[in-house]
Amino acid sequence: MDTRTKAKTIEQALRNRGVRWTGQRQAIIEALVNTEEHLTAEELLHASRAIDESVSAPTVYRTLNLLVEAGMVSKRVFQGDSACYELLLGKGHHHHLIDVESGNIIEFTNEQLDELLDEFAAEKGYRIACHKVELFAVPINKPAPSDKPTAKPKKR
Amino acid sequence: MDTRTKAKTIEQALRNRGVRWTGQRQAIIEALVNTEEHLTAEELLHASRAIDESVSAPTVYRTLNLLVEAGMVSKRVFQGDSACYELLLGKGHHHHLIDVESGNIIEFTNEQLDELLDEFAAEKGYRIACHKVELFAVPINKPAPSDKPTAKPKKR
DNA sequence: CTTACTGCAAATCATTTGCATCCCT
DNA sequence: AGGGATGCAAATGATTTGCAGTAAG
């Protein structure tokens, strides 16, 4: 699915939910589909403004919230500060492996893993509505720099 | 390990890191070890004040941060707002199953799961430093209330 | 004694909200 | 038209920080 199609799909989905299609939303969606995964609200704001000067932060947040509610975007909150948003359109369920050294986020899927989790939950008497797996990892060439394995993107 | 021992262990660990042992920290640690998992900074503040009136919010945060840095407490940020802290002392690695209906958090371990993840990461050329698995699930008696599976503890 | 620790009040910062105006439909 | 959407400015709310006083070692 190319970016144009994605944008149109999102537009339709939102219109169907009864929201109005404005120039700002158009710009925000364009910026969103043209971006490679995982951006913060502020990054999206900048990108959107490059398309339409008039986009404001509240509108970005409001639109992002709409998208999250519509299930087209996922919101994730890491330690530290701002939330990261990710366009889900067209991608299946997946997990994240965060390269602690570079900060890169690698997406992956693993059926075996999903099955294992479903089975486990079933045993406990639950049905999984949504699950999240995050691996914080280091490349296996260098021997881990020191002792603190946990990612610490102290930004605030 | 009983709560007294836990408290002493934490005290020693922190002293070894060269921090001074104050009445407030004593109260905060006592409150912490006497609590059943997963509390917010504010909850800990209340509990601490029940022991020592003079404990203030900044001190709770400062102490909590010390504990996190020392690796004795984990901090987790869910969607929404305040972070949740969890005493790790004496418990092994574990994951969480969050009951979406009741908000209860059930801890579990699963070796098979951990192995699977380690193997997977190795294949990708990574060594896992720390991983996090969160299952948002609903009890399998009632048929899920509606359509939105994602936990929405809208508090803000 | 020295200087880390504390409480208080003020500062931060991401995100939200009130409101008057604007413009999709 | 009519009501949702927008920008602006102000509000929120968790967490942090500056500072002067206090107390641990």
Image: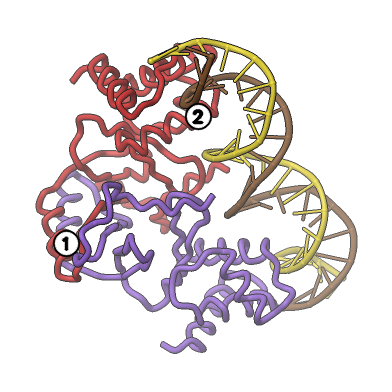
Chain colours: A red, B purple, C yellow, D brown
| Residue A131 in the figure: left or right of residue A51 | left
x, y (%) of residue A150?
40, 54
Q: Amino acid at mark 1?
A: Glu
Q: Secondary structure at mark 2?
A: helix
Quarter-wise, where is residue C8 in the image? bottom right
Question: For the point 30% across and 26% down, which residue is it?
Answer: A16
Question: For the point 15% across and 53% down, which residue is it?
Answer: A114
- The lab-note entry on whether marks 2 and 1 share a chain reads no
Is disc 1 surrounded by few (<14), some (14 to 19) or many (20+) residues within 10 Å?
A: few
**Foreground disc of the pair 2, 1:** 2
- Marked residue chain, label 2: A
Q: Secondary structure at mark 1?
A: helix
Q: Amino acid at mark 2?
A: Glu
Question: For the point 41% across and 87% down, which residue is it?
Answer: B1
| Residue A115 in the figure: left or right of residue B9 | left
x, y (%) of residue A42?
50, 29
Is disc 2 surrounded by few (<14), some (14 to 19) or many (20+) residues within 10 Å?
A: some
x, y (%) of residue A123?
14, 70
Mark 2, residue position: A42
Mark 1, residue position: B115
Question: For the point 26% across and 61% down, which residue is it?
Answer: B138
- Marked residue chain, label 1: B
x, y (%) of residue A37?
32, 30
